Image (cartoon, rainbow, N blue to C red):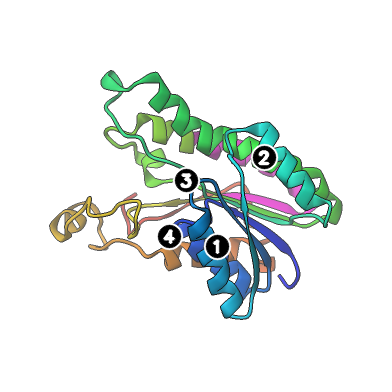
Amino acid sequence: MENRRALVTGGSGDIGGAIARALAADGCDVLVHAHGGLERAQAVVEAIVAAGGRARAIAFDLVDGEAARAVLEAELAHGPIQVLVHNAGIHDDAPLAGMREEQWRRVIDVSLHGFFHVVQPLLLPMARTRWGRIVSLSSVAAVLGNRGQANYAAAKSALHGATRSLAREMASRGITVNVVAPGVIAGRMIGDAFDEAQLKAIVPAGRAGKPEEVAALVRFLCSDAAGYVNGQVIGINGGMG
């Protein structure tokens, strides 16, 4: 992975930050993306640099296709980005019967339209190198469904179809495209939503996962060793399903 450039969207979050640190440890030059959390992204960069790695923070709104393309084209002027981890996503939960249209649209905009806005500009430069890794972060909610998360499950499960199709398009160019679908992972995203008894009831492993455990799986999928893993949705959820 030495000297390959990597982009992690939503890199300021707990899982995104762990992924960025893992890729940097493998020798990637990491672009840590944020939209509203640029200070947190910069903190991830500082931790990577302190550990001897290379990273920079970049900011743009994934929902704004023109803005995303402008930033990415400026980055591509310095060379291809061969590793992309699309981790960005938001929750805005409500039962569908009471969900506002803006809740539906915003959640889908970030996860799904954001995928297109960030992946599409990178594909041809990546293909010219005949090597690439694309990993999207989904959720167990996209596999099993979850009350109050029809918008989130719709956005994330749509990535599964996009991933399988893109994998077929790009495999002959040495590019793999996969999905990692975490379950309950400790961090700011879940906060105090689950107590120990609830975790034991819904997660066979009886605990929340760690961001570093998700990052270890993503790190493998982005490695040379994972070249024959393509078009897959891989759960990491303590046995939830």
The three-letter code of the residue at mark 4 reads Asp
Residue 178 shows in this picture: yes
Q: Residue at x 67, y 40 (%)?
A: 68
Quarter the N terminus occupies? bottom right
Vertical relation: 100 (above or below) 171: above
The three-letter code of the residue at mark 3 reads Ser
Q: Is residue 196 left or right of residue 47?
A: left
Identify the residue under disc 4: 14
> What is the CA distance from the residue labelled 3 to the residue labelled 4?
15 Å
Q: Is residue 98 left or right of residue 27?
A: left
Identify the residue under disc 1: 42
Disc on res. 68: 2
Stretch of the chain drawn in magenta: 157-178
Vertical relation: 104 (above or below) 178: above
Main SS, magenta residues = helix
Q: Earlier in the sequence, mark 3 or mark 1?
A: 1
Between disc 4 and disc 2, the foreground one is 2
> What is the CA distance from the residue labelled 2 to the residue labelled 1?
19 Å
* Image position, residue 137 (x, y; %): 50, 49
Q: Nearer the viewer, residue 233 or 197?
A: 197
Instruction: Verify CB contact (< 8 Å) between mark 3 and mark 4.
Output: no
Disc on res. 138: 3
The three-letter code of the residue at mark 1 reads Gln
Q: Earlier in the sequence, mark 2 or mark 1?
A: 1
